[in-house]
Image (tube, helix red, strand yellow):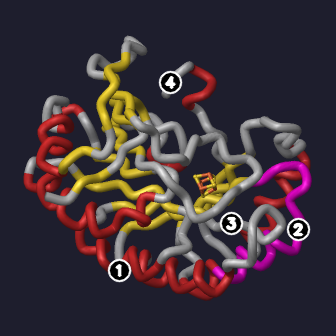
Amino acid sequence: MLKLPVSEIFSSIQGEGPYVGVRQLFLRLPKCNLTCPYCDTETKIPKQFRVEKVPGTRIFSKIDNALPLDKLLDLLLTYDFSIHHSLSVTGGEPLLWADELLVLLPFIKENGLKIYLETNGTLPDQLLQLLSLVDVVSMDIKLPFDSKNFWDVHETFLRYSNQKEVFVKIVVHQDTPLKDLQYARDLIARVDPSILTILQPVTPSQGILTPKPKQLLEWQSLLLEKLINVRVIPQTHVFIGQL
Ligand code: SF4
């Protein structure tokens, strides 16, 4: 039986992007292939992961990693799927666990929950493995200023994702270079100018500052020169103390 290490499991609201406010069950998986300077997530594999069995109580059970997939499914099924829009498979970078997810996700869908994949958009081969199981792809575009140059791999990833419902999220801060945003805009426009694109002002941390009001409006205008649907949406869950 395959095992999957987990970071945490909880039920909450989606705080980012166009699905902000919908109820989701979150399966956060450890490890990431990137090291973004504004990362707010612990990506190492913990010896034990935490589960908030009663949503909103902040009372967590600890469970040893890694969990056999049948036990993980049993754990997820203790939540009431009927009140959740989808299972948010997030991380870290969840596509690092594509082999395990390929086994787990069909059972989630059989039990009536959609799959919402939150990904950094850099592992297109692994996405292809899972694409038939995924309902919504929330894909980050990582800008070279904050990471490495992923333009080619992002474009391939976005073309694959565009076979499903997809939106793109770009985290921006005061030092985000205009040329990176121009390149991201052109990349998305080449694939499909109607793809919803979210500019997400960074939640300030570690000296990284949220963009000034004028910057955000100028950047949105810049993207709207070639894209049809560009929105500015911050991380909302942090305002109201949600996980
Ligand atoms: S891709 Fe996401 S999880 Fe990975 S380092 Fe960047 S912000 Fe953190």
Badge 2 vs badge 4, beta-carbon distance below 8 Å = no
The answer to whether the residue bearing label 1 lies less than 8 angstroms from the nearest atom of ligand 1 is no
Question: Alpha-carbon neighbours of circle 3 within 10 Å: few (<14), some, or many (≥20)?
Answer: many
The amino acid at mark 2 is Leu
Q: Is residue 110 magenta?
A: no
| SS label for mark 1 | helix
| SS label for mark 4 | loop
Using the image, tell me which numbered label, if any, was put on residue 142.
3
Q: Is residue 185 magenta?
A: yes
Q: Position of residue 182 (x, y in %)?
A: 80, 75
Q: Quick check: 114 left or right of 172?
A: left
The residue located at (46%, 46%) in the rendering is 45
Residue placed under numbered mark 1 in the picture: 128
Of mark 3 and mark 1, the one earlier in the sequence is 1
* Alpha carbon separation for disc pair 3 and 1: 20 Å
Using the image, tell me which numbered label, if any, was put on residue 71.
none
* Alpha carbon separation for disc pair 4 and 1: 32 Å
The amino acid at mark 1 is Leu
Of helix, strand and loop, which mostly describes the magenta segment?
helix
Badge 2 vs badge 3, beta-carbon distance below 8 Å = no
Q: Is residue 2 above or below residue 86?
A: below
The residue located at (54%, 82%) in the rendering is 192
Using the image, tell me which numbered label, if any, was put on residue 242.
4
Which contiguous range is marked in magenta? 172-187
| SS label for mark 2 | helix
The answer to whether the residue bearing label 3 lies less than 8 angstroms from the nearest atom of ligand 1 is yes
Using the image, tell me which numbered label, if any, was put on residue 178.
2
Q: Quick check: 199 left or right of 2?
A: right
Of mark 4 and mark 1, the one earlier in the sequence is 1
* Alpha carbon separation for disc pair 1 and 2: 31 Å
